[in-house]
């Protein structure tokens, strides 16, 4: 098997995922197109050498439907021969797309591929694609379905994270993100989104609030109490009877933000890189996905990381930097607790609590973020992972070359 | 045709009158279904017929639906041959009603239902298959699909037509809980089109046929839209997502009927109607074939009905009627008994030690009556008349002339003996003395009586006005006459009697006690209290065992245990949980809900929470529960009760499986989905049940050891209903 190398990673800034968000007036297709254009233009890429473009997208309906990857290939004026495929592994779609692109390279199917993702949550709201899992009694009933927020609160309850714990984590995430922006740590990857005239529409993550404090968060009411009390607390306590009462601690301030954005990672063989004059920045050392208990849903990151590290013959301490999507604060606290990861190795430049989580794109975005950070701080290896709906986890280990 | 009469009027409207011969109520028998097919053929082929009105020839109602006796016996439709051919045959049989009703709906001519009385189950479903429905303006008329209440699924189009008429969310309680609607409600729900005076239903239906008569059901029209939207619309999706969760919250996954109804609605509302009813029939059969349906139909419908007719009554004793009954003790039980008696028109003497206490007992009835009047359920005159039947007094002279005395004083032998003698001094030779004791053996109490033949246990449940069961206990000397009269009394006050023989705790208290005690055993085993009560509730019992201990009161349980210890002497086995209870009751005064502290704390604002100090008394060693542990706790809690019920059979405490099952569900809330502890054992099979119990006995102690009777049944492959059903059959 060939090694898969990362030559470049780009992402759009993340716009607030509402009607008054800066990227709301840009189509999802345009976001994906601008990412592909940037990868081409930054690297002087002969796009006919690209075999496939794999894009994650979680709500692939409406303008995100009908294989947005192939559509973006065409609108970005890539060579007609470049294929495109849209995939969905819920929140890990962007990372899974990178892993699939890497697998295509490793297997010899592709010499050069792009993995990435796109999600305009302001234009195609979360849940627009329906889905049997929560809706069909056959699956919902059997798996003790609960919404993610209730699952995140269940994690906090089971593993003893108080409201103060999750809020403190959120404050730190905001602080780190604001500091990282101030320090210019994202500028290597972030490409400004242009409007229809070619003017810059947005060049920074729109939801970062460095001024967040414990006091400002304390005023927010937990988001999932009503839903929980109506039915879902009863559902999860049937699955986890050790819980007397679910402690609802999550709210908009300690959960990932709803945003718009897209990202792409250029991956290829060593030979292809040399032929095209591309400098390999890192190597995909390995990747894995797992299924975990679906009702608590969000405990996959620690489990998939253990699986991947074992496969690679590595230990938790061998990883220099961890990047775990901040879906909810308790998800990150749980992984740090389970694997005994110090906070100064985890999400060192903040995460989705501050900058948002454009579902289909996040995995590719945070891979780029941590690659930049490895280079900036001159470290070697990073593990990128995300919790996934329906109880899954996906992880990737990269190593600088 | 034997079940229908057809008269075609000069306008070409055929009036089809449904009147099953020899039955008080129209039900959907096999011959009815066949004849509906013939009627449809006639409607289609007879050019003279322009449209149809279906009504009932019975004053008792429109149609009561399928005969559950026919369905429930022999395992019903699911009981045929095995394998794929058997299933296919069962499907065809199960689809017969759907097919007949659908043929009616698509016959090409307008069909209206003139509903002149109750329409239940299949009876409502045939009306829903008509193109137009007119109902008599009588608030007593009930329209309902009650199948889910006995573990069944409305299988003649109900799960498909009702959501298409009302929307999924609005239809849910009528489908899942069997909630009934009155005519006005049905009109508001768009389930019927017109409500008219009773004598005009047929005419109104005819008028529609003649003037508007549309022979196409809404769902067969091109532009049909499901009200509220289907599962993949924004609003419809939320209905299912929340509905699935609410269903799990309420049923804990114990009731296949409710889940299958929801599945049938989910899948059926996404396809054209002909496919929808095929899906419904498949889920109908799946439900039918579940042990839950079998057990629930038998216990909650058939057996309940039989016991309610006094099936356990000795036939050779002439009927009696209690006209005057004295109640000794005006505490909560006595007051409740006085109220239900007075409601049944019985002259009631309510005696207590002080006039004040006796009056307080009467005030209980007064309050309930006031509520009924304020809610419009009773007239003031009626309430006054009921209240006037209760005479509160301290004077035993008032007992004179009573046909029966119910003693409901403290659970103390001396006090009971004293009031027995005082009352008997006033009683006629043939009057019956009934003790409402829940724990003290009747034979022992009867020693205080001068007429032990007339001495019997009549055990009510609290709150008396809500609980439908009365456990009648035969002492060693109690006569058949006393039993017959007691049953007559229980039936008169509209309760369901079961008859048991004397034993400590009789049948219900004895078996119920094992549930709360098993919870305490688990506590002593180190299982986290939240796990015990969460899984306890999930078994289908009304509450977890620890909270149940709190509700019953820990000090009461403690006192009963101390008494039993005294009575049994060396035979009493102290359990590991005893020191925990002793410390809570004696030292910490944690008596349970009644003093606001037990296993739980009861804050004034907000829900109860587990007492934090409990882990000091009962250290938790098992803090997490995986599926295996959950299953084991579930089995322990249910099987512990079931094995005790089996012991009651072996000891002759109870002799009729119907009484054992009905008594368990009505008396102590045994998980209704099982059909009762005896149905549970029969469904599992004696052999498998014995094996599981042996395993549990080895692990947890001899309280799980199956009695010899069960081993014998396991060997012979017998069931309780097979072996002990003879009495049931003979009496039925």
Image (tube, rainbow, N blue to C red):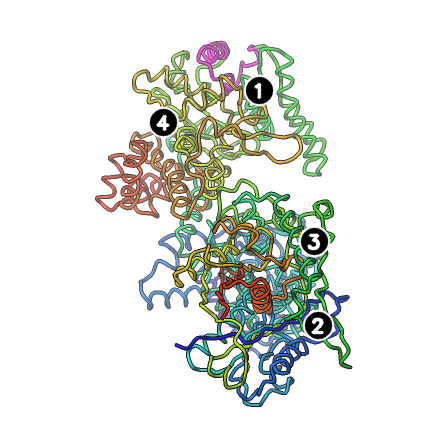
Q: Which residues are magenta?
A: B396-424
Q: Is residue A191 above or below residue B243?
A: below
The alpha-carbon separation of the residues under discs 1 and 2 comes to 64 Å
Of the numbered discs 1 and 3, the one sitting upstream in the chain is 3
Of the numbered discs 4 and 1, the one sitting upstream in the chain is 1
Residue at (53%, 23%) from the top-left corner? Answer: B591
* Marks 2, 3: nearer the viewer: 3
Q: Is any part of residue B313 visible from this angle?
A: no
- Secondary element at tag 2: loop
Residue B331, which numbered label?
1
- Secondary element at tag 3: helix
- Residue tagged 2: B212
How many residues crowd mark 3 within 10 Å: few (<14), some (14–19), many (20+)? some
Of the numbered discs 3 and 4, the one sitting upstream in the chain is 3
How many residues crowd mark 1 within 10 Å: few (<14), some (14–19), many (20+)? many
Of the numbered discs 2 and 3, the one sitting upstream in the chain is 3
């Amino acid at each position: 098997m060939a090694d898969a190398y990362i030559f470049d990673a780009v992402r759009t800034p993340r716009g607030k995922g509402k009607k008054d968000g800066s990227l709301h007036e840009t189509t999802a297709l345009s976001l994906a197109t601008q990412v592909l254009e940037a990868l081409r233009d930054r690297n002087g890429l002969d796009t006919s050498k690209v075999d496939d473009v794999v894009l994650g997208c979680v709500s692939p309906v409406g303008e995100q439907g009908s294989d947005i990857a192939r559509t973006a290939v065409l609108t970005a004026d890539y060579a007609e021969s470049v294929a495109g495929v849209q995939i969905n592994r819920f929140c890990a779609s962007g990372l899974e797309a990178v892993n699939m692109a890497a697998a295509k390279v490793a297997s010899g199917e592709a010499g050069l591929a792009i993995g990435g993702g796109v999600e305009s949550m302001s234009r195609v709201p979360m849940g627009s694609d329906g889905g049997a899992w929560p809706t069909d009694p056959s699956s919902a009933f059997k798996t003790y379905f609960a919404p993610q927020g209730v699952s995140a609160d269940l994690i906090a309850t089971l593993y003893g994270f108080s409201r103060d714990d999750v809020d403190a984590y959120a404050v730190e995430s905001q602080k780190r993100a604001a500091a990282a922006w101030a320090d210019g740590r994202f500028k290597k990857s972030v490409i400004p989104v242009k409007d229809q005239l070619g003017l810059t529409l947005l060049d920074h993550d729109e939801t970062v609030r460095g001024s967040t404090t414990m006091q400002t968060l304390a005023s927010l009411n937990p988001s999932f109490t009503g839903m929980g009390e109506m039915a879902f607390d009863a559902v999860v306590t049937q699955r986890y009877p050790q819980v007397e009462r679910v402690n609802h601690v999550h709210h908009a301030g300690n959960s990932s933000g709803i945003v718009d954005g897209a990202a792409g990672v250029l991956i290829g063989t060593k030979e292809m890189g040399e032929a095209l004059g591309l400098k390999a920045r890192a190597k995909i050392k390995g990747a894995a996905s797992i299924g975990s208990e679906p009702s608590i849903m969000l405990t996959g990151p620690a489990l998939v990381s253990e699986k991947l590290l074992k496969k690679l013959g590595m230990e938790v301490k061998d990883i220099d930097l961890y990047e775990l999507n901040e879906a909810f604060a308790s998800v990150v606290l749980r992984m740090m607790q389970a694997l005994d990861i110090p906070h100064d190795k985890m999400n060192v430049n903040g995460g989705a609590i501050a900058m948002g989580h454009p579902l289909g794109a996040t995995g590719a975005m945070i891979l780029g973020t941590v690659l930049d950070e490895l280079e900036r701080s001159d470290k070697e290896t990073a593990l990128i992972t995300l919790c996934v709906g329906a109880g899954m986890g996906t992880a990737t280990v990269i190593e600088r070359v | 045709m034997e079940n229908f009469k057809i008269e075609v009027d000069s306008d070409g409207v055929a009036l089809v009158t449904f009147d099953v011969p020899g039955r008080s109520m129209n039900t959907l028998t096999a011959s009815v279904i066949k004849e509906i097919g013939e009627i449809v053929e006639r409607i289609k082929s007879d050019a003279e017929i322009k449209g149809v009105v279906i009504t009932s020839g019975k004053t008792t109602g429109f149609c009561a639906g399928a005969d559950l006796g026919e369905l429930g016996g022999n395992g019903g439709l699911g009981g045929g041959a095995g394998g794929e051919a058997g299933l296919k045959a069962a499907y065809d049989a199960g689809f017969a009603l759907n097919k007949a009703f659908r043929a009616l709906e698509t016959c090409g001519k307008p069909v209206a239902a003139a509903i002149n009385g109750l329409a239940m189950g299949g009876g409502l479903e045939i009306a829903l298959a008509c193109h137009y429905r007119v109902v008599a303006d009588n608030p007593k008329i009930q329209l309902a699909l009650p199948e889910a209440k006995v573990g069944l699924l409305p299988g003649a189009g109900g799960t498909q037509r009702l959501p298409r008429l009302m929307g999924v969310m609005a239809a849910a309680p009528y489908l899942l809980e069997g909630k009934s609607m009155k005519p006005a409600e049905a009109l508001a729900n768009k389930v019927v089109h017109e409500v008219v005076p009773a004598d005009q239903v047929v005419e109104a239906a005819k008028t529609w046929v003649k003037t508007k008569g549309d022979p196409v059901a809404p769902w067969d029209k091109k532009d049909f839209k499901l009200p509220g939207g289907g599962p993949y619309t924004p609003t419809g999706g939320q209905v299912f997502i929340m509905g699935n969760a609410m269903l799990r919250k309420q049923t804990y996954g114990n009731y296949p009927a409710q889940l299958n109804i929801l599945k049938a609605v989910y899948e059926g509302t996404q396809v054209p109607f002909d496919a929808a009813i095929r899906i419904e029939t498949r889920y109908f059969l799946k439900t039918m074939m579940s042990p839950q349906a079998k057990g629930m139909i038998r216990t909650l419908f058939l057996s309940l009905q039989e016991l309610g007719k006094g099936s356990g009554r000795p036939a050779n004793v002439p009927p009696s009627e209690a006209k005057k009954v004295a109640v000794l003790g005006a505490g909560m039980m006595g007051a409740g008994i006085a109220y239900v008696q007075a409601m049944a028109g019985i002259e009631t003497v309510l005696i207590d030690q002080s006039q004040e206490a006796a009056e307080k007992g009467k005030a209980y009835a007064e309050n309930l009556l006031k509520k009924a009047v304020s809610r419009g359920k009773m007239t003031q005159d009626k309430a006054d008349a009921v209240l006037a039947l209760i005479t509160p007094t301290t004077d035993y002279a008032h007992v004179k002339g009573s046909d029966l005395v119910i003693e409901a004083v403290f659970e103390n032998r001396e006090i009971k003996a004293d009031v027995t003698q005082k009352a008997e001094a006033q009683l006629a030779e043939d009057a019956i003395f009934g003790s409402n004791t829940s724990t003290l053996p009747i034979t022992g109490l009867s020693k205080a009586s001068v007429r032990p033949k007339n001495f019997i246990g009549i055990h009510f449940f609290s709150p008396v006005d809500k609980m439908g069961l009365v456990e009648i206990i035969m002492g060693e000397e109690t006569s058949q006459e006393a039993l017959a009269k007691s049953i007559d009394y229980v039936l008169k006050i509209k309760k369901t009697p079961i008859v048991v023989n004397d034993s400590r705790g009789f049948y219900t208290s004895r078996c119920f006690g094992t549930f709360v005690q098993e919870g305490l055993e688990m506590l002593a085993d180190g299982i986290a209290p939240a796990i015990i009560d969460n899984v306890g509730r999930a078994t289908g019992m009304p509450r977890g065992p620890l909270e149940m201990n709190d509700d019953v009161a820990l000090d009461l349980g403690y006192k009963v245990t101390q008494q039993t210890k005294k009575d049994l002497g060396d035979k009493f086995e102290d359990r590991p949980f005893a020191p925990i209870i002793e410390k809570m009751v004696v030292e910490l005064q944690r008596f349970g809900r009644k003093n606001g502290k037990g296993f739980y704390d009861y804050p004034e604002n907000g829900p109860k929470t587990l007492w934090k100090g409990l882990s000091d008394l009962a250290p938790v060693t098992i803090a997490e529960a995986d599926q295996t542990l959950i299953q084991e706790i579930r089995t322990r809690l249910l099987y512990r009760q079931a094995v005790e019920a089996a012991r009651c059979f072996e000891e002759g405490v109870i002799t009729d499986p119907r009484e054992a099952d009905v008594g368990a569900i009505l008396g102590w809330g045994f998980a209704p989905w099982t059909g009762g502890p005896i149905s549970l054992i029969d469904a599992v099979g004696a052999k498998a049940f014995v094996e599981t119990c042996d395993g549990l006995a080895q692990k947890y102690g001899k309280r799980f050891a199956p009695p010899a009777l069960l081993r014998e049944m396991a060997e012979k492959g017998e069931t309780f209903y097979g072996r002990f059903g003879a009495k049931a059959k003979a009496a039925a």
